[in-house]
Image (cartoon, grey):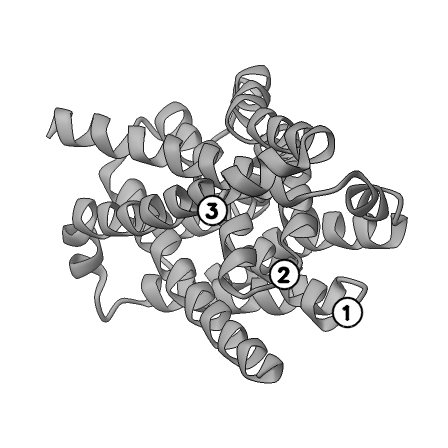
Amino acid sequence: MGTLHLLFNAVTVVFIVATMFAVGLAATLPALRAIFTNPSLLLRALLANLVVIPLLGWGIAALFSLPAAAFIALVLVASSPGGPFGAKLGMVQKGDVVAGAAMQVLLAAAGSITFGLTADAILTAAKVGTEISLDVVALVRTVAVLQLIPFAIGLIVRNYAPPTARSWHPAAETVSNVTFLLVLAGMLLGNWHDIVALVGSRTLLAGFVLGGAAFAVGTVLATGSPVRRTTMGGVAAVRNEGPALAAVGIAFSDTPAVLGALAAILLSGLAVAVPIAAVLSHRRADSII
């Protein structure tokens, strides 16, 4: 199991790096400038992901009267924005990939700082769990190494050597696609017992509801074209597992019940977001024909 765990982690790293590198190869400086000089889009995305969705997680956990472990897991997931699957969902739905990737990196960096404070405040107010304290520097470093740097390298190649970027992009996207499927398979196989144990429970249903609600909030609060708005919805729906897993290890001593609920909620969120992205992709392909 130790070898399989290391292999899964390695594939996950390759997936994140390849996805961000591929997005960078397709990005342009004017396109990025249009995102980061749009204060309305930035503020709305931050509001949706750092405030509204964590509060939604709290509300959904209370609405479904989740047991303590599942309540904690749902709040941790809701409080952690900027999951690396966000950029991939932009690709899957044929959305505004550059805007989605840029926002994902921004949210992951911001979430590294706000996650502990947000989750701790909600769990304290709900009188569930314990104080959460995380290594913010380590989390920001992880975001920089796995997401920001590959994206920046791809962007540099795209803007200073466009022919090279065009020739490299298909290979990078293929690696991203293949490893995406491997990561999904690994998540399902590695956590199947947790998912099966929660089948028919309110925990999985709460995860589905949070995923759908987060997609809707991200879409509604975004600005711009429908393509950009649904891309922001996909980014909002996919939460960042890194800080959440770190919190389980630090604040909850890797409690199996919390870990199992966390895995199930993360996968149920993907189970909502991926089909939505696929349907959007199909509709956009039909509109081109």
Q: Earlier in the sequence, mark 1 or mark 3?
A: 3
Instruction: Kindly identify the residue that appears in the image at 37 percent across and 64 percent down.
Output: 271
Mark 1 or 3: the one toward you: 3
Instruction: Report the side of 101 relative to 84 (left or right).
Output: right
What x and y, as percent, mark residue 226?
A: 72, 72
User: To which residue does mark 2 refer?
Assistant: 231
SS assignment at label 3: helix
Three-letter amino acid code at the position of disc 3: Pro
Q: Earlier in the sequence, mark 1 or mark 2?
A: 1
Instruction: Kindly identify the residue that appears in the image at 43 percent across and 64 percent down.
Output: 274
User: To which residue does mark 1 refer?
Assistant: 225
Asked whether 137 or 285 is in front, the reply is 285
User: To which residue does mark 3 refer?
Assistant: 170
Instruction: Report the side of 199 relative to 181 (left or right).
Output: left
- Crowd tier of the residue under label 2, counting other residues whose Cα lies within 10 Å: few below 14, some 14–19, many 20 or above: many
> How far apart are the alpha carbons under marks 1 and 2?
10 Å
What x and y, as percent, mark residue 34?
A: 85, 48
Instruction: Kindly identify the residue that appears in the image at 62 percent across and 69 percent down.
Output: 216
Q: Is residue 119 above or below residue 3?
A: below
Instruction: Report the side of 146 relative to 118 (left or right).
Output: left
> How far apart are the alpha carbons under marks 3 and 2?
21 Å
Instruction: Report the side of 262 relative to 113 (left or right).
Output: left
